[in-house]
Amino acid sequence: MLVVTRTVEQHRAVVAALVPAQPVEVVPLAQARGRVLAEDLVAGVSLPSFVNSAMDGYAVRAAELAGATEDAPVVLPVATDIPAGRTDVPPLAPGSVARIMTGAPMPEGADAVVPVERTDGGTERVALHHAPEAGTHVRGIGEHRAVGLVDLPGPQGAGRVDALGGVAVVTLPGNPVSSQVSFEVFLRPALRAAMGHPHPERPVVTATLGERWTSPSGRRQFRRGALDAVRGTVSEVGNPASHLLAALARAECLVSVPAETTELEAGTPVEVWLLDG
């Protein structure tokens, strides 16, 4: 018997040579799971394809709200409603605002959105308690994916409805990422506990950040992440925007960022919720 001594790299090469490259096949999308693209999948359109609102609230001209505060709001007339899906959006007249839903197209002339939580929710006239900068809560054309690039693969509510016999109702935000994260944080553990599951919560580990993060003050965040179990580090997948569904699909975990935290340096220990547990 001939015994040959090889390095790890040499034996890896020998093993790899036993499995040559496989031929390219065209298969239906439903059968493509677990396969690898043979060529780049190119985005045919920019995503989003139009400038739209990232929040439920009011489309405004930011300059008209300069100086607005909680104690001294700016009060303006509401010119129109812009629900998601509306296409006949009129320009925004100076000195007015438009009620707008998440994902709805921004009216010409508007350059920011004030979340409904920072207003009195008026329908004819609205008091706006916040002075946003231009671009606040606005999604630009191609922000998620520009045409021709390779495509890689809000409000909470809970209660009971008396008219339906006290049936429990939980409302989730409309953005797909917000909805999924809200389900993970609030609804999944409650459902599993109700079923008597011995481990209703996702497994939680501690890891260190692979890069520096910033977070808005006063807002608890659950950011999508990829965990390097060997190094014990976690890195962000995509960015915190709540409409980036592809980033959620690639995420392995959620990283909990406390509400009082505004900056996290690389190497900071963080709480990580594993999504495969």
Image (spheres, rainbow, N blue to C red):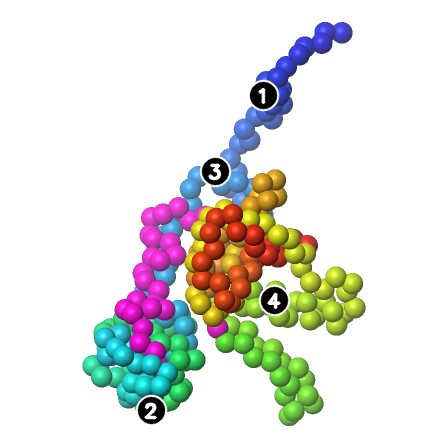
Q: Secondary structure at mark 3?
A: loop
Q: Which mark is residue 9?
A: 1
* Mark 1 nearby-residue class (10 Å; few <14, some 14–19, many ≥20): few
Q: Which residues are magenta?
A: 127-154
Mark 4 or 1 closer to N-term? 1
How far across and down, in percent of the image, does residue 44 sit? 36, 52
Whether label 2 touches label 3, CB < 8 Å: no
From mark 4 to mark 2, how far is it between C-alphas? 36 Å
Name the amino acid type tagged 4.
Val
Q: Answer yes or no: do the residues labelled 4 and 1 have beta carbons within 8 Å?
A: no
Amino acid carrying mark 3 in the image: Ala
> Three-letter amino acid code at disc 2?
Glu
The mark lying in front, picked from 2 and 3, is 2
Residue located 29% across and 88% down the image: 75
Say what secondary structure mark 1 lies in. helix
Dividing the picture into quarters, in which one does residue 70 lie? bottom left
Q: Position of residue 166 (x, y in %)?
A: 68, 88
Who is closer to the viewer here, 45 or 83?
83
User: Which residue shows up at 56% across the image and 60% down it?
Assistant: 256
Disc 4 crowd, CA 10 A, few/some/many (<14, 14-19, 20+): some
Q: Which residue is mark 3?
A: 38
Q: Earlier in the sequence, mark 2 or mark 3?
A: 3
Image: 93 above or below 31 = below
The reply, left or right, for residue 135 in relation to residue 237 is left
